[in-house]
Amino acid sequence: MALLETVDVVKRFGGLTAVNKVNFKLDQGRIVSIIGPNGAGKTTFFNCLTGIYHPDEGQIIFNGRPLHRLRPDQIASHGLSRTFQNIRLFGNMSVIENILVGMHVHLRQSPLSTLFHLPSFKKEEKEAELKAEELMTYVGLKGVGNELAKNLPYGGQRRLEIARALAADPLMLLLDEPAAGMNPQETEEVTRLFRRIRDQKGITILLIEHDMRVVMNISELICVMDYGEKIAEGTPDEIRADTRVIEAYLGRGAVAGQHEKKVA
Amino acid sequence: MIPVFLKNTTKRLEQGLCPYILILVHMVLGTALVYISPRSNLAFLVLITSFFSLYSFKADRRFKLAAGMVLTLLIFPVVGVRNIFYLEVIFQISVFSALALGLNIVVGFAGLLDLGYVAFYAVGAYLWAFFGSQQFYILHFAPGTQPSHLPFLLPGDAFYLFVFVAILVAALTGILLGTPVLRLRGDYLAIVTLGFGEVIRVLANNLDKPLNFTNGPQGITPIQQPTMPQVAVDGFNALFGRVVGHTVSPADMYNVMFYLFALAVIIIIIFVTRRLDDSKIGRAWTAIREDETAAIAMGVPLVRMKLAAFAVGASFAGVMGVLLAGSRTFISPESFSFMQSIGVLSMVILGGSGSIPGVILGAATVTILNLQVLQGLSLYLSQLRQTDAVIPIINFAWANLSSQLDPAKYQRLLFGLILILMMIFRPAGLIPSQRRKREPASDEAEAKEYHGTP
Ligand SMILES: Nc1ncnc2c1ncn2[C@@H]1O[C@H](COP(=O)(O)OP(=O)(O)OP(=O)(O)O)[C@@H](O)[C@H]1O
Ligand SMILES: [Mg+2]
């Protein structure tokens, strides 16, 4: 059974249909990308999955449970974690605290144990801190735990967002343009990081990305959106050769083979 | 040149015994000055700012604790009893510190701009005012028409119980008022909470009919106080009678007692605030302040956490309300005006939103400006008016100065100035809040392992 399945998901903003009847299936343990021109509705689709928006129509089934009426925090606690296209860290909190917030759903501390620092509280906090430090090392942020998040360099902030999302021990990670604004070397590093996350932690990854080097490099499946609709789906090679995709990117009439390279 | 010089001097002052000596000198100087001239505002300022020395100089924590205890438990009560006005100032600083700490949870931690915070203070105050007075037996009388010699509903010592009841009632009120406004952000939230604050005040003003709960604008009095053991009065007289210079009456002792209560409440509030701040709840609050959308996407239940902030903040104010009702023995809606909310907010912003020492400093500064500086100026001006002094160059006789110009009435100007100046020059406040620095947990664990297996 698919880990994530959407059925005819529609999201409208006034007269604009940002997501139009998207059907989508994603198996456990895959790395899948969503691509599409600007304004295609990719981020809106993510927002529907994570409960930031409620879809106007359709269903979203994740891990056997319907998600489309749940609040974002409930969805997060069901194992769906995300990053944001325009980085949304807790700027005035330290790096480690950002990650600890990501663990919110797993921390059991009661008000009483918090006030009196009961052993259960101390133990849990210590373990959480240890785990946060592990995650920092894992994404390549070792030793900056006390730094304020807003003071990290751009690439560091992107990594921190990933660490924060991983802190919830998700089943599935949604990454919205995680390599945007990175230089080629950083891009390569995070691409490797995604693969490690999938291979070592077994976390399914759904990724929106404009950088075709990343997309073609790690995706096992690519889904293409245009004007809110899913217009194609397939392996990187299939997508490279798909005329509708080339049209979506380069406009009608640009079909023939000479532009294929640009897409790839 | 000068900054370098300053830096070197401060560095030298932080070495060895220097800080200890400075703190002690400041404390002793302040105490001596107040002792010599019990009516001087300046002397009192020197004394009260010794807290600042205590906070800012680097010294052993135990020393600081001891010095702080001597100041708050010994010097302030004695000095305060000698000149009861000082005790009033100190008490108000304590009350407003507690209120500011409560509002700090809502505004400073969770970032929810609450302009009606004083409502919860009113709830606490009216709670004890109703149950701790004869009001229960006046329910069916219009204000001013009640018969004399009515009994009290509860004994004065029920005060202690109501301190705890107030925590619950105020927290519930916080949740009640918080629920409908949770979807609002920023300015909208501010306006609606402002409205709710006014609603509570208007209720207090008008709930004298059909049943007379609050006695309307006249307010409720007398409100009972917990019993004061004669031993305490006698003991204080025996110990400090000489220093004080006159026999201390039970009324004076009540002032000391309520000051000590307020102090105890503040200490508990600081404890609770720090513990919460450093836990899942506190982190969730700060996350909400920083970015609501990101917080909820990370699994922080917005509604529950915001309500928790409202409830905790409100409960602090509720307790202080009970204390206020007890100490004043009189409560009226006037004490809970919108200006009070703004005042507490300006304390939080002046001191440093989110910072515990900052907020206390803010409360102290604003209260002193209000009670001592503005009122001192008023007094000075009215004295000048009596004389036939003239401002030289412009040839203006002080006696002609309009009596409208009464600085004590310029509270609003003061709050406004504070808010504007802080926004321009120090948006993070006098003592900005800082995130806790953590020792790497893995180091500690490794160290333990290392020592554990020799
Ligand atoms: N909250 C909103 N209100 C109104 N319109 C919106 C809203 N969010 C998105 N849209 C519109 O929906 C369409 C899809 O936007 P979306 O952000 O999902 O695109 P995208 O595929 O993520 O684009 P990009 O690659 O630029 O990030 C756009 O036309 C956008 O203007
Ligand atoms: Mg987008």
Image (cartoon, grey):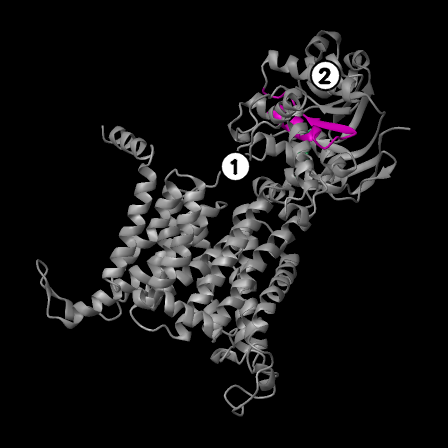
Disc 2: which residue: A215
A249 left or right of B84 in image: right
Please provide percent x and percent y for residue B391.
Answer: 11, 61
A51 left or right of B98 in image: right
For disc 2, the neighbor class at 10 Å (few under 14, some 14 to 19, many from 20) is many
Q: Residue furthest right?
A: A1
Q: Residue furthest bottom?
A: B147
Stretch of the chain drawn in magenta: A158-181
Magenta stretch holds residue A168 = yes
Residue A117 visible in the picture: yes
Please provide percent x and percent y for residue A71.
Answer: 74, 44
Please provide percent x and percent y for residue A207.
Answer: 73, 24
Q: Residue at x 55, y 35 (%)?
A: A93
Question: Ligand 1, what quadrant?
Answer: top right
Label 1 – label 2 distance at C-alpha:
38 Å
Q: Is mark 1 within 8 Å of ligand 2?
A: no
Residue B42 visible in the picture: no
Mark linked to residue A161 = none
Disc 1: which residue: B435
Residue B247 in the image: above or below residue B366: below
